């Protein structure tokens, strides 16, 4: 419901970026700010946030995989 309301606000107020896409994040933030200041009432959010959990591997990571990850991270850092 909140997402649909944000889309409606963007469309009605013609809030779009340079590519013509709706500025949904900005609309949603403005709605949340107005809600926190008790200026509007928003419906409860239907999306439940989940905290990401680390994945466990089936087998231990071998030394060659560790070296590969180290080399890859050095390459990525040097390309920045």
Image (tube, rainbow, N blue to C red):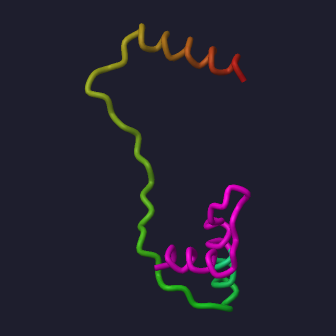
Residue at x 68%, y 84% (from the top left corner):
34
Hey, which residue is sitting farthest left in the picture? 58
Q: Is residue 7 left or right of residue 44?
A: right
The quarter of the picture where residue 27 lies is bottom right
Q: Indicate the position of residue 76 as horizontal and vertical percent values.
A: 63, 20
Q: Indicate the position of residue 56 as horizontal and vertical percent values.
A: 33, 34
Q: Indicate the position of residue 79 as horizontal and vertical percent values.
A: 69, 19
Q: Is residue 77 above or below residue 17?
A: above
Q: Is residue 22 magenta?
A: yes
Q: Nearer the viewer, residue 64 or 6?
A: 6
Residue at x 64%, y 79% (from the top left corner):
31
Q: Is residue 18 above or below residue 54?
A: below
Q: How many marks?
A: 0
Q: Is residue 41 left or right of residue 80?
A: left
Residue at x 48%, y 12% (from the top left corner):
68
Q: Is residue 11 above or below residue 65?
A: below
The quarter of the picture where residue 21 lies is bottom right
- Quadrant containing the C terminus is top right
Q: Indicate the position of residue 64 as horizontal and vertical percent values.
A: 42, 7
Q: Main secondary structure of the magenta part?
A: helix
Q: Nearer the viewer, residue 67 or 24?
A: 24
Q: Is residue 10 magenta?
A: yes
The magenta stretch spans which residues? 1-29
Q: Is residue 47 left or right of residue 71?
A: left
């Amino acid at each position: 419901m909140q997402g649909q309301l944000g889309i409606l606000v963007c469309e009605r107020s013609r809030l779009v970026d340079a590519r013509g896409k709706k500025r949904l994040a900005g609309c949603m933030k403005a709605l949340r700010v107005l809600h926190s200041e008790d200026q509007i009432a928003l419906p409860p959010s239907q999306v439940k946030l989940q905290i990401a959990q680390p994945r466990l591997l089936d087998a231990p990571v071998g030394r060659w995989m560790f070296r590969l990850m180290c080399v890859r991270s050095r390459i990525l850092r040097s390309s920045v």
